[in-house]
Image (cartoon, grey):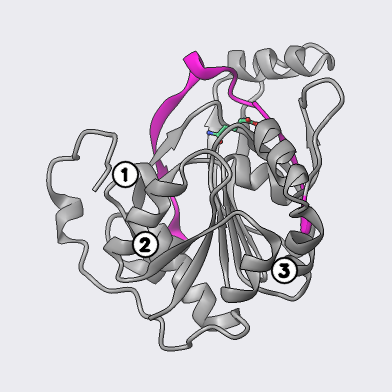
């Protein structure tokens, strides 16, 4: 059976392990550098990125995590995990936080604001639905969510989100930057792929829709080093046309 590592320092690692189980794959909790040798791919879950960074530092995980990314092993960062993978992050707490890096993008750590600005939205992701089937949109769960402001030439944008103009002016003032344009239309990026790296600003693991997990498993099959190429997403998506199951999903 294919093993996918799930960084289990803090945050929604149990929910990712449950989602992997739903697509027939075993998630392995990773807390120590040497445990990374047992897996060919890794999910870095959402959580509190500064706390996660401090715990990763305490367990001396950063050198091994950077090596894992550099070796071309598939890594998927969700929310705080996206921040970890970014080469550059803005909106950080005073003193900043250590990043793994590797993803050629600039991410705003709390672009959409604090916990009370958390939201859900139906997001279009043509690449996801063309690869995994199911509806053209997926339900994005954004919790104190980051957003990607800039990407490099190798980064493929998989999904973006239209920001209402007042949100943009808030995020600029939060940045201490110039006043936001209250009239301009703006879209921020919320899902990207760069070779062996996948990053999403939302939490698929908190929904019943396993297509992002299946998409990542296909990536493992395509690029994963030392991972089984027979990884195939299983199951159908007929249940997606059912009434949406209320969150949270802990199965
Ligand atoms: N749901 C999340 O992972 C939120 C992450 C949050 N923006 C942080 O940096 O801590």
Indicate yes or no whether the magenta region holds residue 249. Answer: no
Q: CA distance from mark 1 to mark 2?
A: 12 Å
Identify the residue shown where x is 63% and y is 36%: 147
* Quarter of the figure with residue 176: top right
For marks 3 and 1, give the one nearer the viewer: 3
Front position in the image: 196 or 123: 196
Dot 1, crowdedness within 10 Å: few (<14), some or many (≥20)? many
Q: Which residue is mark 1?
A: 207
The percent position of residue 229, horizontal first and vertical second, equals 48, 88
Identify the residue shown where x is 65% and y is 58%: 32
Tell whether circle 3 marks a residue whose Cβ is less than 8 angstroms from ligand 1.
no
- In the picture, measured across the screen, residue 132 lies left or right of residue 142, that is left
Indicate yes or no whether the magenta region holds residue 114. Answer: yes
Identify the residue shown where x is 65% and y is 20%: 168
Q: CA distance from mark 3 to mark 1?
A: 28 Å
Q: CA distance from mark 2 to mark 3?
A: 20 Å
Question: For the residue labelled by badge 2, is the local secondary structure a helix, a strand or a loop?
Answer: helix
Front position in the image: 206 or 127: 206
- In the picture, measured across the screen, residue 248 lies left or right of residue 148, that is left
Taking the image in four quarters, ligand 1 sits in the one at top right
Give the vertical position of 248 relative to 158 (above or below): above
Q: Are marks 3 and 1 in contact (CB under 8 Å)?
A: no
Magenta stretch, residue numbers: 100-126
The percent position of residue 209, horizontal first and vertical second, equals 30, 52
- In the picture, measured across the screen, residue 23 lies left or right of residue 198, that is left
- Label number found at residue 20: 2
The percent position of residue 103, horizontal first and vertical second, equals 74, 56
N-term-proximal mark, 1 vs 2: 2
N-term-proximal mark, 3 vs 1: 3
For marks 1 and 2, give the one nearer the viewer: 2
Q: Which residue is mark 3?
A: 68
């Amino acid at each position: 059976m294919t093993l996918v590592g799930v960084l289990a320092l803090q945050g929604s690692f149990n929910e990712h392990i449950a989602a992997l189980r739903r697509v027939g794959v075993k998630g392995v909790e990773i807390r120590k550098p040497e445990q990374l040798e047992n897996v060919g791919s890794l999910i870095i879950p959402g959580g509190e990125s500064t706390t996660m960074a401090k715990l990763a530092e305490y367990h001396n995980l950063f050198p091994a995590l950077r090596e894992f990314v550099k070796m071309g092993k598939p890594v998927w960062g969700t929310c705080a995990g996206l921040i970890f993978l970014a080469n550059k992050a803005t909106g950080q707490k005073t003193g900043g936080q250590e990043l793994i890096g590797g993803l050629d993008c600039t991410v705003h750590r709390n672009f959409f604001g604090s916990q009370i600005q958390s939201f859900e939205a139906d997001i279009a992701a043509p690449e996801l639905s063309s690869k995994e089937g199911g509806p053209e949109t997926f339900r994005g769960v954004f919790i104190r969510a980051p957003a990607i402001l800039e990407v490099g030439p190798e980064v493929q944008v998989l999904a973006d989100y239209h920001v209402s103009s007042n949100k943009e002016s808030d995020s600029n003032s939060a940045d201490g930057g110039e006043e936001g344009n209250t009239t301009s239309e703006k879209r921020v990026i919320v899902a990207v792929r760069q070779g062996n790296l996948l990053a999403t600003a939302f939490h698929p693991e908190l929904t019943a829709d396993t297509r992002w997990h299946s998409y990542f498993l296909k990536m493992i099959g395509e690029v994963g080093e030392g991972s089984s190429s027979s990884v195939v997403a299983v199951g159908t998506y007929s249940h997606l046309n059912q009434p949406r199951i209320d969150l949270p999903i802990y199965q």
